[in-house]
Image (cartoon, grey):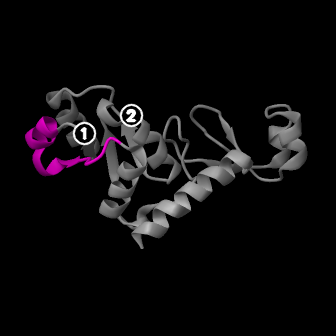
Amino acid sequence: MSDNPPRLLVDRTAGRLARWLRILGLDVEYAPTCDPAILAREARQSGRRVLTRSKVLSERLGCGALLLASDDVTAQVRQVVSEVGPAACEAFSRCNLCNARLSEVPRASVEGRVPAYVFKHHDRFAACPVCGRYFWQGTHWQHMLGTIEGILREKR
């Protein structure tokens, strides 16, 4: 991870993008608005760069915004990774729901908190200290990893 990782703020025009960028390990907040005053204030207070599909908003915010060129979330992810650099990504290190950094937890601590089949077949688990969700490297993780590797491979 870079010494000065990017801090991003996604507006409502690109909500799906926030989750994928969090999966990549980027620090991404979601603002369910396109109000330039609110976004500018939030970005300034939190030191974040706004990601938007709105050309008008991007122009109003100036260099504090990145105008996303596509409606396709995969293309948006590629654009952001190209902008911040693949070295800024630390896949699966953040909760894709609330953006908190995940912590590895002992296997015994998740017994009864994850499905029995999952507990039986997995040894490593991570937990979100904010929302309490648990994560493990199951088949869904493998599919996401394949998608991420494809995106990052194209940018190298």
- Residue at 34 percent across and 37 percent down: it is 14
Closer to the camera in the image, 107 or 90: 90
Please tell me whether mark 2 sits on a helix, a strand or a loop.
helix
Residue 54: quadrant of the picture: top left
| Distance Cα–Cα, label 2 vs label 1 | 10 Å
Crowd class of label 2 (few under 14; some 14 to 19; many from 20; radius 10 Å): some
The circle drawn on residue 15 is: 2
Q: Position of residue 86 (x, y in %)?
A: 42, 66
Crowd class of label 1 (few under 14; some 14 to 19; many from 20; radius 10 Å): many
> In the image, 131: left or right of 110?
left
Q: Are marks 2 and 1 in contact (CB under 8 Å)?
A: no
Name the amino acid type tagged 2. Answer: Gly
Which quadrant is home to the C terminus? bottom left
Please tell me whether mark 1 sits on a helix, a strand or a loop.
loop
- Identify the magenta region: 55-71
From what the image shows, is residue 25 above or below residue 41? below
Closer to the camera in the image, 154 or 33: 154
Q: Give yes or no for residue 59 being in the magenta stretch.
A: yes
- Residue at 79 percent across and 49 percent down: it is 106
Q: Position of residue 128 (x, y in %)?
A: 61, 40
Q: Position of residue 27 (x, y in %)?
A: 42, 48
Q: Position of residue 101 (x, y in %)?
A: 54, 47
Mark 1 = which residue?
Answer: 53
Residue 53: quadrant of the picture: top left
Q: Give yes or no for residue 1 being in the magenta stretch.
A: no
Number of numbered tags placed on the structure image: 2
Name the amino acid type tagged 1. Answer: Arg
> In the image, 12: left or right of 124?
left
> In the image, 77: left or right of 94?
left
- Residue at 39 percent across and 67 percent down: it is 3
- Residue at 83 percent across and 50 percent down: it is 122
